[in-house]
Image (tube, rainbow, N blue to C red):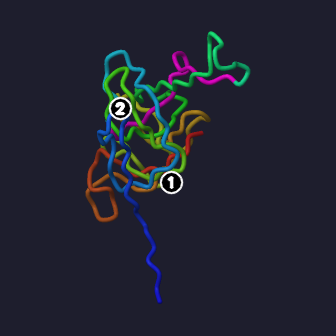
Amino acid sequence: MAEAITIEGGLRIVGPDGTTIFEGGAQVKNVIQAVNGEASAVLARGEAARIDPTNSDLMRWDKAIGDTQGVKDAVKVLRVSALTDVGFLGVALNSAPAGGTVAVAGSGSVLCVKCVSGSGTVGNAYTGSATAGSVGNQAAPSIGQVLGVVVKAPGTAAGQTGTLTQGGVLVAPR
């Protein structure tokens, strides 16, 4: 008797008010709750998110509950915006206005990411680009500049993603 193998599982993320934030069939691992740290720009669903090192509050293990700095953990993320961007966290699963909450598909996730039109050679790395909100692709990027590995090229030909502006990525920041 043959066993069924689930290749693509459904995922639904529900916000605290009961509204659906994300629903889809992507292979999403390590969902990270973050805050859109942009001054005014929306972090759109499918865009690469990178850590805002200046404004993120990361929990410190030497602090106790009740301390003035406390044990809060508020990871703030920014949109990709430059070739030299570093600190990628993953891909936004929902759109969030500045200051809004965003669910980020983290390391190990396999899904599409917004990319510069036609950018993405399988095996290369998705990295920053000069096009706000879109990743580019490099064969030999510097450490810290990688969102993940291109696993499906953008395009409309057979075997591609079906659009020029979304490429398949295995999220593996480094």
Asked if residue 56 lies in the magenta stretch, the reply is: yes
Q: Where is residue 14 in the image (x, y as percent from the top left)?
A: 36, 42
State which region is magenta.
45-60
Question: Which is more N-terminal, label 1 or label 2?
Answer: 1
Which amino acid does the dot numbered 2 rest on?
Answer: Gly
At a point 37% along the width and 49% down the height, the residue shown is 112
- Res 115 seen here: no
Q: In which quarter of the image is residue 80?
A: top left
* Residue at position x 60%, y 39% in the image: 174
| Residue 52 drawn at (x, y percent) | 50, 22
Q: Identify the residue at the far bottom of this view.
A: 1
Up/down of 113 relative to 67, above or below: below
The residue lying toward the viewer, choosing from 143 and 31, is 31
Helix, strand or loop at mark 2: loop
Residue 46: percent from left, percent from top:
35, 41
Which residue matches tag 1?
123
Q: Which mark is residue 133?
A: 2
Q: Which amino acid is tagged 1?
A: Gly
Question: In 3D space, how far apart are the residues under numbered discs 2 and 1 (Cα atoms)?
Answer: 21 Å
Q: Residue 105 carries which label?
A: none
Mark 2 vs mark 1, foreground winner is 2
Q: How crowded is mark 1: few (under 14 residues within 10 Å), some or many (20 or more)?
A: some
